[in-house]
Image (tube, rainbow, N blue to C red):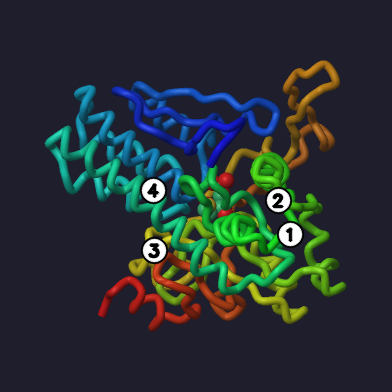
């Protein structure tokens, strides 16, 4: 995707470093950074300088290749990186792809590049298949950021929208703000603006009301892990949108590459759900009138919080998965067949 006329991806390899756009600063600042050590890669993932399941997988893949090149113990590097975020299975898929080429450092870097390019191709193909679900002027509701910051170059949930825009179909997007870290308000809204796509930002709770009023044609979100039975973990709040979509007869699709499907996790209750720091809910960060990024408290001091970063939407609420091999139903049989497993 282009920013100010220049091509960017969320992550890239540069010499012996992993370059990335620091997503914590968006939309206020568009700045890139680079990781030259294993701990910098791990911190970028756990601290959410980069985020979104496929992007996490690509970062981990380059990170492991980098670790091997700078002489880190490969098994230790794998263990460190695989523990940085627990829910997105793409992390492990990216690491395993590179580990398969160990200990040849050249082959490990080549494997990371191949993983990166295949995620780009998958995201692109998701857009082509997802286009069939959209009509002229379709109103799409999305949650969190499953855009090109989250999946190299096209995004997953946004890929059909970007494809529709390029086909002149004039799509419209309801952007759900996504408390507590506001990936929708900060990143998806920025992506839509950058791509010139008509959109409105909504509070997370507004989605159900818009669906009840018949103002949403389809919901499309991304995923962090899809269990063998089709239950899907995605950003906290996705399940609420799925329930509202079901109650109002609105189709609810999950857009995800095959790297997000985990045939070894039998159902949603077996997906590990990341719990993040309480302060993500107690505080908000934004730009002051003086252009300074500032974090402020929004609760009484010491308010106790629980902060699950993801929820699980049962397969029964999912109309289908938009993947690089086509749109498939949310059934174990269709998933096994797409993964070419017996
Ligand atoms: O915590 P995040 O920002 O990494 O969560 C991101 C999401 O939940 C996305 O919807 C998901 O990773 C799919 S990204 C194509």
Q: Determine the residue located farthest toward the front in the rendered image.
A: 168
The yes-or-no answer for disc 4 within 8 Å of ligand 1 is no
Give residue 311's position: percent from left, percent from top: 59, 60
Kindly identify the residue that appears in the image at 32 percent across and 36 percent down.
62
Q: Crowding at label 3, few (<14), some or many (≥20) Cα neighbours within 10 Å?
A: many
Q: Give 47 or 261, whichever is nearer the viewer.
A: 261
| Residue holding disc 1 | 172
| Whether label 2 touches label 1, CB < 8 Å | yes
Specify whether 205 is left or right of 119.
right
- Whether residue 213 is visible, yes or no, is yes
Given contact means CB atoms under 8 Å apart, are the residues at marks 2 and 3 in contact?
no
Residue 91's disc is 4
Q: Residue at x 67, y 38 (%)?
A: 280
Left/right placement of residue 97 relative to residue 2 reads left
Earlier-in-chain disc, 3 versus 4: 4
Q: Secondary structure at mark 4?
A: helix
- Which of the 4 image quarters holds residue 139? bottom right
Q: Alpha carbon of mark 3 to alpha carbon of mark 1: how far? A: 27 Å
Q: CA distance from mark 2 to mark 1?
A: 7 Å
Nearer to us: label 4 or label 1 = 1
């Amino acid at each position: 995707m282009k920013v100010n006329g220049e091509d960017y991806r969320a992550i890239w390899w540069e010499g012996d470093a992993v370059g990335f756009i620091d997503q914590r600063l968006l939309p206020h600042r568009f700045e890139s950074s680079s990781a030259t050590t294993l701990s910098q890669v791990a911190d970028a993932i756990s601290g959410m300088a980069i985020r979104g399941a496929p992007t996490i997988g690509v970062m981990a893949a380059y990170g492991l290749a980098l670790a091997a090149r700078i002489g880190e113990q490969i098994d230790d590097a794998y263990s460190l990186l695989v523990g940085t975020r627990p829910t997105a299975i793409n992390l492990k898929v990216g690491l395993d792809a590179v580990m398969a080429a160990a200990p040849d450092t050249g082959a490990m870097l080549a494997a990371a590049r191949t993983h990166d390019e295949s995620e780009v191709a998958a995201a692109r193909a998701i857009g082509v298949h997802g286009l069939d679900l959209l009509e002229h002027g379709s109103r799409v509701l999305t949650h969190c950021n499953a855009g090109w910051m989250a999946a190299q170059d096209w995004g997953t949930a946004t890929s059909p929208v970007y494809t529709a825009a390029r086909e002149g179909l004039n799509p419209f997007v309801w952007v759900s703000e996504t408390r507590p870290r506001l990936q929708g308000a900060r990143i998806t809204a920025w992506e839509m603006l950058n791509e010139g796509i008509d959109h409105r930002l909504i509070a997370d709770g507004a989605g159900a009301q818009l669906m009840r009023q018949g103002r949403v044609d389809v919901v499309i979100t991304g995923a962090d892990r899809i269990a063998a039975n089709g239950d899907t973990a995605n950003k906290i709040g996705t399940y609420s949108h799925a329930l509202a979509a079901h109650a109002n007869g609105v189709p609810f699709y999950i857009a995800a590459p095959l790297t997000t499907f985990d045939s070894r996790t039998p159902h949603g209750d077996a997906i590990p759900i990341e719990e993040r720091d309480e302060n993500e809910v107690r505080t908000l960060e934004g730009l002051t009138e003086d252009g300074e990024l500032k974090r402020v408290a929004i609760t009484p001091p010491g308010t106790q919080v629980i902060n699950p970063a993801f929820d699980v939407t049962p397969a029964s609420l999912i109309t289908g998965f938009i993947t690089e091999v086509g749109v498939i139903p949310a059934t174990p049989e269709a998933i096994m067949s797409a993964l070419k497993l017996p």
